[in-house]
C-alpha cells in the first residue's frame, strides 16, 4: 500500500524509487527498517499503521474540556461506474486491503450504525473482539467490540440471529415513537436495546446521532446501506466519508453509495488522505 495524498517528501521519494520510510501513518519510518523492506509503499501496512491513518479527531476521543462531540463517519465501496453492490452485496467489489481497512474502522468505532435492509442482505453478525485492538480500546474506555445499532422503522428483523442471541455488546435498535409496540417488545425480549429517535414511524438522523452520543457512543461508523447514508447526508450529520473506489466496471442498475432525494445544495467534502493498492483507491474525506 502507498500513500498518494497528502504528498510529502517521503511520498515523492518512494514514487521515484528512493526507498522512503513512513509517509505519515505512524511508526514505520523512524530509521532504515522500511527502506530495507522495500519502502513503506512496497509492503502491507500493519493494523496499527492503518489505525493511525484513520484515527478519529482528538476532539472526539479526548476533548480538553466539555462533553465529547460525536463524529459520524461512513465506510463505503464503489466501482468506477458508481455501483455500491454486485448481486446485492458489496463483497464482490472489495479486496483484501479494503477488508483490512474495514476491520480497522470497526476496531476504532464505539458503535456501527446500519440500516435494517443491509442487515438482511449482508447477513450481519455481531462485531467481534480483535486482539490487535484490545489494548487501545481498553485505554480509550471502549468495550471489547463495537456495538451494532440497527436503524429500522418496522423492526422487521429476525431476532433469532446471532446479532441478537450472542453479541459481545447488546445490539441497539433505533426506531420511531410510532413503531409497533409488539415488535419493540419482541426486540427487547431478544436482548436488544430499543432507542426512540423519531416522533413518527421513522428515525430522524440528527436525533439518532445524539441519542447514541448520550449513551457514550461518540465514535460512530455507518456501513450503509445507501438509503441510510443518503438520510445522514441529507440531514447534514455526516462528518466523514471513507470511500474505496474499486477498479471495476459492473454496468447494471446497482445502487450508488447513497440514495434518496437530492440535497438542495451539493455538500463539499475535503480530501484528507488517499491510499492505493493494486489499483484500489482508499479515500478519506471530511466535511468542510
Image (spheres, rainbow, N blue to C red):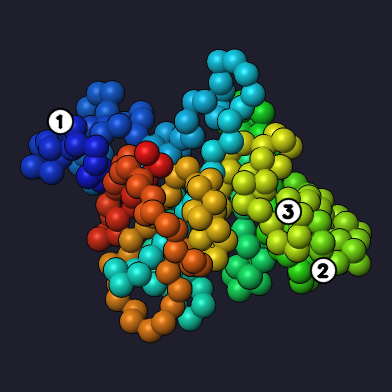
- Going from N to C along the chain, the mark reached first, 2 or 3, is 2
Residue depth check, mark 2 versus mark 3: number of the one nearer the observer: 3
- What mark, if any, has residue 160 been given in the picture? 2
Q: Residue at x 33, y 61 (%)?
A: 245
Q: Quadrant of residue 30?
A: top left
In-image side of 137 versus 25 (left or right) = right
Q: Dividing the image into 4 quarters, which one contains the C terminus?
A: top left
According to the image, label 1 marks what residue?
A: 9
Q: Earlier in the sequence, mark 2 or mark 1?
A: 1
Whether 219 is drawn above or below 182: the answer is above
Distance of label 2 from label 1 (alpha carbons): 54 Å
Residue 219 at x, y = what percent?
Answer: 58, 38
Q: Residue pushed farthest front?
A: 264
Tell me what residue is drawn at x 59 percent, y 15 percent.
65
Which numbered circle lies on residue 198?
Answer: 3
Picture coordinates of residue 224, whole percent (x, y) = 54, 60
The answer to which of 132 and 186 lies nearer the viewer is 186
- The residues tagged by marks 1 and 3 sit, at their Cα atoms, a distance apart of 50 Å
Q: Which mark is residue 23?
A: none
Whole-number angstrom distance, CA of label 2 to CA of label 3: 26 Å
In the rendered image, the vertical position of residue 167 relative to residue 32, given as above or below: below
| Mark 2 crowdedness (10 Å alpha carbons): few <14, some 14-19, many ≥20 | few
Amino acid at each position: 500500500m502507498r500513500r498518494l495524498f497528502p504528498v510529502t517528501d517521503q511520498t515523492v521519494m518512494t514514487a521515484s524509487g528512493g526507498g522512503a520510510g513512513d509517509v505519515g501513518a505512524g511508526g514505520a519510518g523512524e530509521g532504515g527498517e522500511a527502506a530495507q523492506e522495500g519502502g513503506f509503499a512496497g509492503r502491507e501496512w500493519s493494523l496499527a499503521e492503518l489505525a493511525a491513518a484513520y484515527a478519529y479527531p482528538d476532539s472526539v476521543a479526548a476533548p480538553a474540556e466539555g462533553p465529547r462531540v460525536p463524529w459520524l463517519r461512513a465506510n463505503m465501496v464503489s466501482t468506477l461506474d458508481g455501483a455500491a453492490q454486485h448481486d446485492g452485496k458489496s463483497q464482490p467489489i472489495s479486496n483484501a486491503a479494503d477488508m483490512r481497512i474495514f476491520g480497522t474502522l470497526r476496531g476504532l468505532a464505539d458503535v456501527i450504525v446500519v440500516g435494517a435492509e443491509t442487515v438482511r442482505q449482508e447477513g450481519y453478525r455481531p462485531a467481534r473482539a480483535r486482539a490487535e485492538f484490545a489494548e487501545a480500546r481498553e485505554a480509550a474506555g471502549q468495550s471489547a467490540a463495537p456495538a451494532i445499532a440497527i436503524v429500522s422503522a418496522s423492526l422487521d428483523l429476525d431476532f433469532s440471529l446471532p446479532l441478537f442471541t450472542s453479541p459481545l455488546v447488546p445490539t441497539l435498535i433505533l426506531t420511531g415513537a410510532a413503531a409497533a409496540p409488539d415488535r419493540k417488545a419482541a426486540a427487547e425480549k431478544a436482548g436488544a436495546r430499543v432507542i426512540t429517535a423519531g416522533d413518527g414511524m421513522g428515525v430522524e438522523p440528527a436525533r439518532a446521532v445524539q441519542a447514541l452520543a448520550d449513551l457514550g457512543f461518540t465514535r460512530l461508523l455507518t456501513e450503509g446501506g445507501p438509503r441510510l447514508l443518503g438520510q445522514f447526508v441529507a440531514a447534514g450529520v455526516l462528518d466523514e466519508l471513507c470511500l474505496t473506489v474499486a477498479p471495476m466496471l459492473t454496468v447494471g442498475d446497482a445502487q450508488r453509495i447513497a440514495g434518496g432525494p437530492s440535497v438542495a445544495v451539493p455538500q463539499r467534502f475535503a480530501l484528507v488522505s488517499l491510499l492505493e493498492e493494486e489499483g484500489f483507491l482508499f479515500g478519506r474525506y471530511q466535511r468542510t
